[in-house]
Image (spheres, rainbow, N blue to C red):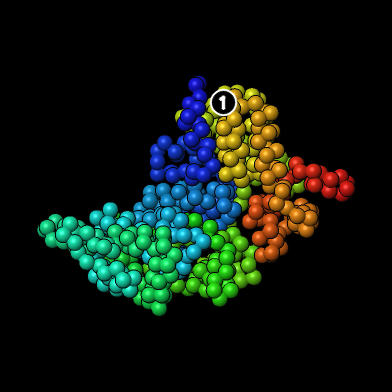
Amino acid sequence: MQLDLSRFFNACNPSYSLSLSEPDERAYYIDFATVRGENIIKLLARTISRLSPDKPTCQLFTGHIGCGKSTELSRLTEDLRKDGFHVVYFVSTEDLDEIDIDFTDIMLAIARRVSQSLEESKITLKAQGFKAFLEGAWDFLQTPMTIEAEGQFLGGQVKANTEGNVEFSLPLGLAKITAKTKGSPGSRSKLRQYLEPRSNQILELINKEIIDVAVQQLKQKGKKGLVVIVDNLDRIDNRLTPAGRPYPEYIFIDRGDQLRKLNCHLLYTLPLGLIFSNESEVLRNRLGGGVEPKVLPMVSVFNREGTANVEGMYLLRQMVMSRAFPDVPAEARLQLISEVFDTPETLDRLCCASGGHLRNLMGLLYSCLQQEDPPLPRDVLESVIRNYRDRLSLSIDTDEWEFLFQVVTEQKVKGDKEYQLLLRNLWVFEYRDSQGNWFGLNPLLKESEKFKIWQQQKN
């Protein structure tokens, strides 16, 4: 079968997350639940659809950046929609600045995305209180909200209803504010001065004028309820607030009680480091309602005792080959390895080097494709692996290597300090099996001279 090189190249772009709502992308999806230790997406969906369909829930989801969270959330979105829920999924970084974010920014982003989705679904929102609130915000920003002849608000937008009357469009009004403040730190800071003392009012308006109205109308249309999934909040920068508090702790712990007060099913991604924080228990109780955050581990390439994980390797091969031949049945794809690699061993070498980190897998493959057309030769892959290894090793000092050697020996990461050093920099990966979670060194670092010398001295 002929390989479509352009399609294959685009499908391997490591910066792109699959959207399972797109029929052409569903064939790329591989279910790794059996080699991640548990079916986390099933747990998240069951909590909403089986255990608490009529009462609001708030769930937390985390993992390494690049381990496949967004793809799994896309699957969760589709599963819940098929089960009868109206799901609003959005990527927070499209609306918010990840290095400068506050609680009220998140609330306005949720209000905008939910109201936009509802408007597209013909759900009528009057939102007169919210309209007045936005007008007050724009007045505070010294940008009065007035109607122009064309029917445009400076801060929002109007539209004609079926009777020809002009009415306010909440999502467009919110979008105007988001656009103005995202690109202007000064405007963002000033708007927060107005919003922060009114944070409880914002929550009340979102609940009363958006969510409660929406849930009632959605159920009249036969829907089971409203689910809001906010992705990419795990990318919030770890810098300190003016009060000296790390922003992730301020957002998710200090403001956790407010984040979970919306009257619908909520799912937030959050930085993995919070799981290792001294306040992880406070996080679980304030924002998670006593339920542990769900952590998406890596795909197991090796077992904790060092042997190869046969099923993990099989599924990673399938992931690579599905990008090359998405329209070919799974078993038949593996008969076409020679169209993509010079030998099956080259494909296995690629999978092992990734350590089960899916973005790294695609990144290594993408780098190979930038150099050569398939079938990819082993020497090109080895060159790419060396470059990745050397770049990763350069940033590690002697003390940090000692932490890494300790992780290799104990297969544990003990606290926030070690997290910041090891996991955040992708030097160490987290895995899960029937015995629980364990940690392993990024396979690229195992090929460094520093590690080889330590291993020889140990033996």
Q: Nearer the viewer, residue 400 or 66?
A: 400
Which residue lies at the image location 49% right of the left edge and 56% below the top edge? 232
- State the image coordinates of residue 304 (x, y, percent, origin top left): 73, 48
**Looking at the rendering, which quadrant does residue 364 occupy?**
top right
Q: Classify 368 as above or below 110.
A: above
83 vs 241, nearest the viewer: 241
Task: Say whether residue 222 is left or right of residue 420.
Answer: left
Residue assigned mark 1: 373
* Image coords of residue 119 (percent x, y): 27, 57
Query: Residue 222 falls in which quadrant of the image?
Result: bottom left
Instruction: Depth check: give the residue in front, 23 or 427.
Output: 427
Residue lying farthest to the left in this orientation: 163
Q: Three-letter amino acid code at disc 1?
A: Asp
Q: At x 26% / y 69%, what residue is drawn? A: 144
Q: Residue visible at 32% across and 55% down?
A: 117
- Looking at the image, can residue 61 be seen? no
Crowdedness of circle 1 by 10 Å Cα count: few (<14), some, many (20+)?
few
Res. 266 visible in picture: yes
Q: Is residue 343 above or below residue 105?
A: above
Q: In which quarter of the view is residue 444 placed?
A: top right
**Whole-percent x and y of residue 325?**
50, 29
Instruction: Report how many numbered discs are placed on residues in the image.
Output: 1
- Measuring from the top left, give residue 287's x and y in whole percent: 51, 69
Residue lying furthest bottom in this view?
Answer: 197
